[in-house]
Image (tube, grey):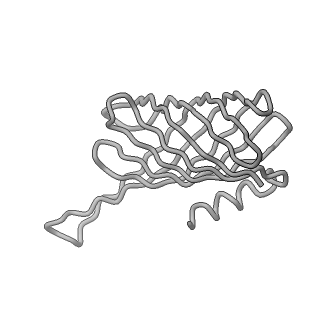
């Protein structure tokens, strides 16, 4: 919740025309990466949306928590296609089960292009989307993920 408050404060000047909140989940074909996110979105300009979310994802069987921000160009009203660019910053704190006092903190950051399609039905939105994460991870630097999101507009 603390991360969502920080996102709201960062994006507050741009969210005077806030559109709503969403809950989304993405995975890759191999099933080794999963991203869950809860976020807010609003208009920066009529066809430019800003998104901010708190997120959790698994990477090499380790849980990471972080924040995600993105901007996208949108086209359409009831059926809205969009493409955009985003970034994420996350942290993993792995503690040794044998020596409980030893914890190893890892930071991960990355950027991604995103494409998607949203359908707006009154105040509810349903969307499909895909991202191509480019991470600072040493072993695997790229992740293709796709998913579903559900939102509520205000």
19 w.r.t. 74: above or below: below
Between residue 77 and residue 57, name the one nearer to us: 77
Q: Residue furthest front?
A: 121
The residue sitting at 29% across, 59% down in the picture is: 94
152 left or right, relative to 33: right
Residue 152 lies, in percent from the top left, at 69, 51
Q: Which image quadrant for residue 111? A: top right
The residue sitting at 80% across, 44% down in the picture is: 43
The residue sitting at 77% across, 27% down in the picture is: 75
132 w.r.t. 19: above or below: above
Residue 117 lies, in percent from the top left, at 65, 30
Residue 3 lies, in percent from the top left, at 57, 61
140 left or right, relative to 14: left
Q: Residue furthest left?
A: 98
23 w.r.t. 95: above or below: above
Residue 92 lies, in percent from the top left, at 37, 55
The residue sitting at 56% across, 66% down in the picture is: 1
């Amino acid at each position: 919740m603390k991360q969502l408050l920080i996102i709201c404060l960062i994006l507050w000047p741009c969210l005077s025309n806030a559109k709503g909140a969403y809950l989304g989940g993405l995975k890759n074909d191999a099933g080794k990466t999963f991203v869950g996110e809860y976020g807010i979105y609003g208009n920066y300009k009529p066809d430019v949306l800003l998104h901010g979310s708190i997120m959790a994802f698994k990477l090499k069987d380790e849980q990471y928590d972080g924040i995600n921000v993105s901007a996208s160009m949108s086209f359409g009203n009831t059926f809205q296609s969009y493409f955009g660019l985003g970034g994420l910053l996350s942290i993993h704190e792995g503690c040794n089960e044998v020596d409980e006092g030893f914890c190893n903190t890892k930071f991960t950051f990355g950027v991604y292009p995103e494409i998607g399609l949203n359908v707006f039905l009154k105040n509810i939105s349903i969307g499909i989307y895909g991202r191509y994460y480019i991470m600072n991870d040493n072993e695997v630097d790229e992740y293709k993920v796709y998913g579903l999101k559900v939102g509520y507009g205000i």
